[in-house]
Amino acid sequence: MTQKNPDPAQHPIRHRASGELRAVALEQFSAVGFAGTSLQQIADAAGYSKSSVLYHFVSKEALLDEVLTPAINCLEEIVDRLASSAGTAQTRSEFIDEFIDFLLEFRLEVNTFINQGQSLRGIGVIDRAGRLILRLTSALRGDDTSTIDGIRFGMALGGAAYTLVAGATYFPDQVSPEEEVRQALQSVVTELLAPVPLRRPIEGK
């Protein structure tokens, strides 16, 4: 008889340990970098043994996959909605609202796969994030936009992600209320993306 996988809810201690390890790993990957973080460092920071980490995650790459996948799944849903919608000012405004919510919820994850993406190429979850960024770029920029529009897009994406993390890291005494941050992001991201021509729906799609 095939043994069923245990229900995490029936093992609250194990489930809590897994969640704590993911949270600590994400903080370490974002602050120190994936390459500069060891499983032992994650274990020490979380208050567990290295063997406990390996009990829950078979490798550092598997742990990276666990911490980034929820954010990438969310981004994929946002990109799918943008790609299937008509390219109007209303569509763009709705996308910006969704995208800012995404950045605020997953700031550490985005900072990790945006700013470390080049050095971590070849890791499945990072490559998946890269493909989504290319899809998002295509949906926003279209086929005949300029280099300057591409730079604006890059600054809107990478700059917002980095600023959210760096602000809390380097200026902890000056962290603004989240709603104030949200309004500021709306203003800046809208301004940066405004010059990009609205996406034209592909005929037949």
Image (spheres, rainbow, N blue to C red):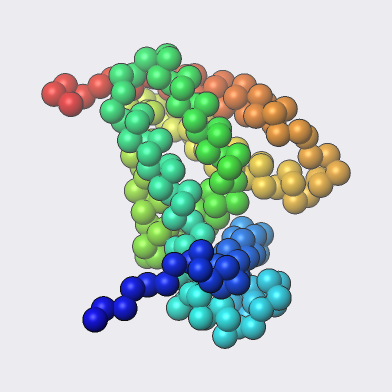
**146 left or right of 114?**
left
Q: Is residue 155 visible?
A: no
**45 left or right of 96?**
right
- The residue shown at (67%, 47%) is 165
| Looking at the image, residue 88 lies above or below residue 169 | above
Locate the C terminus by quadrant: top left
| Looking at the image, residue 93 lies above or below residue 27 | above
Q: How many marks?
A: 0
- The residue shown at (33%, 39%) is 135
Residue sticking out furthest to the top: 89
Residue sticking out furthest to the left: 204
| Looking at the image, residue 197 lies above or below residue 27 | above
- The residue shown at (57%, 68%) is 12
Q: Position of residue 125 (x, y in %)?
A: 40, 59
Q: Is residue 68 visible?
A: yes
- The residue shown at (50%, 26%) is 96
Q: Position of residue 182 (x, y in %)?
A: 65, 29
Between residue 163 and residue 68, name the one nearer to us.
Answer: 68
Residue sticking out furthest to the bottom: 51
Residue 48 position by quadrant: bottom right
Q: Position of residue 114 (x, y in %)?
A: 51, 50
Q: Position of residue 75 (x, y in %)?
A: 43, 42
Residue 161 position by quadrant: top right
Locate the N terminus by quadrant: bottom left
Residue 134 position by quadrant: top left
